[in-house]
Image (cartoon, grey):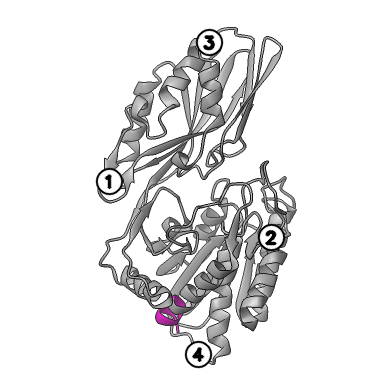
Amino acid sequence: MKIFDELVNETLKMLAIYTVQEEASSGAPFGKGNAEALNAALKLAASFGFKTHNADGYVGWAEIGSGELFGVPGHLDTVPFGDGWTKNPYGEIADGKLYGRGAVDDKGPMLAALFAAKSLLDEGLKPKRRLRFIFGCNEETGWACMRRYAETEEMPALAFSPDADFPVINAEKGVINMEITLPLNGAEISVTAGERANVVPASCTAEVRGVKRVTTGVSAHGSRPQDGENAIVKMLAALATEDASLKLLYEKLNDCYGGDCNLALRDAQSGALTQNAGIIRSDARSVTVTLDIRYPVTFAEEEVLNRLKSAFPNAVLHKIHSHPPLYVPKDHFLIKALLAAYEKATGEKAAPIAIGGATYARAVPLGVAFGPELPGRKSTIHSPDEHISLEDFKTIFNIYREALKALIF
């Protein structure tokens, strides 16, 4: 299929652009690579006949059609590559799979949806709504792109974000990123690990009285810490006898479901709370852990924070940022339409699911996450050798094509 070959080639070009946030410059608030990727996406969309707009490098959009605005928000930035890759993180095809940081999260899916729209336009179909692709550049490090979008651009009445799982997500847990700082009581210990709170760290390094120690784990997305092995927690276990604060951190953070922090919360709509110790830094005086918490949709942020404060009464707690939960009833017509598109493209009956991840669906008045990860596949996002099989990539292209055909064309 010619258009699918074009999709793969353009995705490889996008993967070749380094889009981890770097120093800001004129027109590039998140670094030159992120600005380059945004310009490339807008140029590609313009070649398909879309009207485009670049909001000072923060965010951009590509639109076609008239009438009520329907959005497809996603992002072009990525988490750092990290260690352990056996394939090219800048993109390659091997063993029938598309590898690269962003292949699944979220460059590949955004382009798959864009090309799905192109395929419908190429058939001569006319949009019955305005379709707007929204390209963010700061999803992994703070959502400043979508805050800027909300300040200066038109919000879509409805949206889906291709940045999670199929068949369709009707519930996203609330998110809190919190720094926990405790004194080190003069211990001759230095500990460091992690670059993002939403990544399970695969290695942690410590120096204890001049002796270097290293623990290793398995990386995973911070919203699913149970899928990885946290090297920070392993290091805290190894150092628990060295300092009371390190012992306390280990005791409270060992359970990724928050049981030892009185955070074992669960509801029927979205499941259990999770917590991930994503970053640790220390100096001679103190140690700071950055915690990524995903809490069930029926609980309030205030309750989670109060429970965390009671678990660490002598710590300095600093909230970095948070996102409220998202919940759309299963009988909403958007949920039904997306499920129907998924079932038509795959031949599989399906039901909505809940996730711990935070997508741009919650940045718009009414949106849901829709793909790209298919049921039963092992997730590789935020991990070494992030990839998607070409067969699955074609399937998600077809699913987005059916969804856009039903909702837009």
Name which residue lies at 50% across and 53% down.
378
Identify residue for label 3.
Answer: 243
Q: Which residues are magenta?
A: 403-409
Label of residue 298 in the image: 1
- Residue type indicated by callout 4: Leu
Q: Which badge, 2 or 3, comes first in the chain's sequence? A: 2
Q: Residues within 10 Å of mark 3 (few under 14, many from 20)?
A: some
Residue 300 in the image, given as x and y percentages of width and height: 31, 41
In the rendered view of the protein, which quadrant contains the C terminus?
bottom left
Residue 328 in the image, given as x and y percentages of width and height: 31, 60
- Residue type indicated by callout 1: Thr
Identify residue for label 2.
Answer: 15
Q: Which badge, 2 or 1, comes first in the chain's sequence? A: 2
Q: Which badge, 1 or 4, comes first in the chain's sequence? A: 4
From the viewer's side, name the closer residue of 89 and 304.
Answer: 89
Q: Quadrant of residue 8?
A: bottom right
Of discs 2 and 1, which sits in the foreground? 2
Q: In the rendered view, would you say 334 is above or below 163?
A: below
